[in-house]
Image: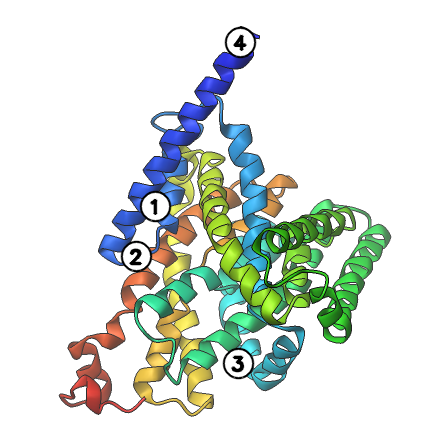
Amino acid sequence: MADHANATTILLIEVGALLLGLSLLGRLGMRFGISPVPLYLLAGLAFGAGGALPLSASTEFFETGSEIGVILLLVMLGLEYSASELLASLNKTKVAGLLDLAFNALPGAIVALILGWGPIAAVALAGITWVTSSGVVAKLLRDLGRVGNRETPVILSILVIEDLAMAFYLPILSALVIGAGLLQGAITLVIAVSVVIFILIAAMKWGRFLSKLFPAEHAEPLMLGVLGLTMLVAGLADRVSVSAAVGAFLVGIAISGPVAHNAVQLLSPLRDLFAAIFFVFFGLATDPNEIWPVLLPAVILALVTIATKTTSGYLAAKNAGIGKLGRWRTGLALTPRGEFSIVIAGLAVTAGIQHELAPFATAYVLVTIIIGSIISRFPDSNWFQRLVSGERLQNTEISI
């Protein structure tokens, strides 16, 4: 009994101290205008195995919290869109989506093959380098006051396409990393993709009836109901190899109207808390000593894919008729990678596919978020505007 009480005391102290530290790191990130995500990853590295001060009692707590964090991140993304909006965006910007895939997934796959990690790791690293961090980009757009800009719908359309593509990509990756035989793997994949398609169709046809299950005007039952349904479906999805994250994303898509709007307001603080825990745990599970051997290729790949993401975003904005400065704002804003990249790496490493993917992904995400948070501000500076326009212009005179 005394041992249990002592363990609980240590757990509370460790969790409380780390959460307080994360609060200070978040404030530091705001002070310098960067996302707190890389700071959370660094905190995890500092207190994990091989770090400066390894935690002893709270690792299991952070592991469970990180799983909840992934689910909340994905359901909140889904709540931002309806199924019809997703499919409309896919049809409208499918060319931009294909360019985005080709420009940004191929470098990751090629690097994995060059490093000798094999085809399954190549598929995983392709996903890591492909998908932009919706959370980081959304925060950047708000912080920089660009929500109403003409190029913002282009940015959001690309994010929507990537999020929808993840609903199919993650089941495919799950089937590959399971390592089942060809027939069993094909069956698992067909089941997973069929479930995703069924839920999308059901969300379009009957999503409004699902939303009626929850009282939009009553906060407590609404929060408990949406959170309970999300975790239930996430668990069931994981049982059929769709991935809990995708299940949560599809629940968010299925809920619409005032219910979705109010659920976003209620769940946002929970998402922020558990998302921070998610990034911390990924750092805790990564030995910082394992980063050094993969740091150079991770940095090189990050620089290459920052360039390719900028190019694909620029071209997407150009095709949409956006002016030069808006094209640069689009491309540079899309460069940070984040939550999905970490989810993909975690899925592969948990299945025993290329242990180096975890430290590689950590270094890669750190570099893209830090550089992306900085260069996304370039189009607001006078020197960049002069460089793009070829002459000295004031901000109010620039056509977007």
Residue 72 location (% of width, % of height): 56, 52
Camera-side mark, 1 or 4: 4
Camera-side mark, 3 or 4: 4
> Badge 1: how crowded within 10 Å, few (<14), some, or many (20+)?
many
Camera-side mark, 3 or 2: 2
Per the image, the residue denoted by label 1 is 39
Kindly check if marks 3 and 2 are in contact, taking CB atoms under 8 A apart as contact: no
Question: How far is mark 2 from mark 4, CA to CA?
Answer: 42 Å
Secondary structure at numbered mark 2: loop
Kindly check if marks 1 and 2 are in contact, taking CB atoms under 8 A apart as contact: yes
Per the image, the residue denoted by label 4 is 3
Secondary structure at numbered mark 3: helix
Left or right side of 34 for 255: right
Left or right side of 246 for 393: left
> Badge 3: how crowded within 10 Å, few (<14), some, or many (20+)?
many
Camera-side mark, 1 or 3: 1
Above-or-below relation of 299 to 310: above
| Residue 295 vs residue 358, the one in the foreground | 358
Question: How far is mark 1 from mark 4, CA to CA?
Answer: 34 Å
Residue most extreme to the left: 392
Name the residue type under label 3: Ala
Query: Closer to the N terminus: mark 3 or mark 4?
Result: 4
Q: Is residue 297 visible?
A: no
Per the image, the residue denoted by label 3 is 96
Question: How far is mark 1 from mark 2, CA to CA?
Answer: 9 Å
Name the residue type under label 2: Ile
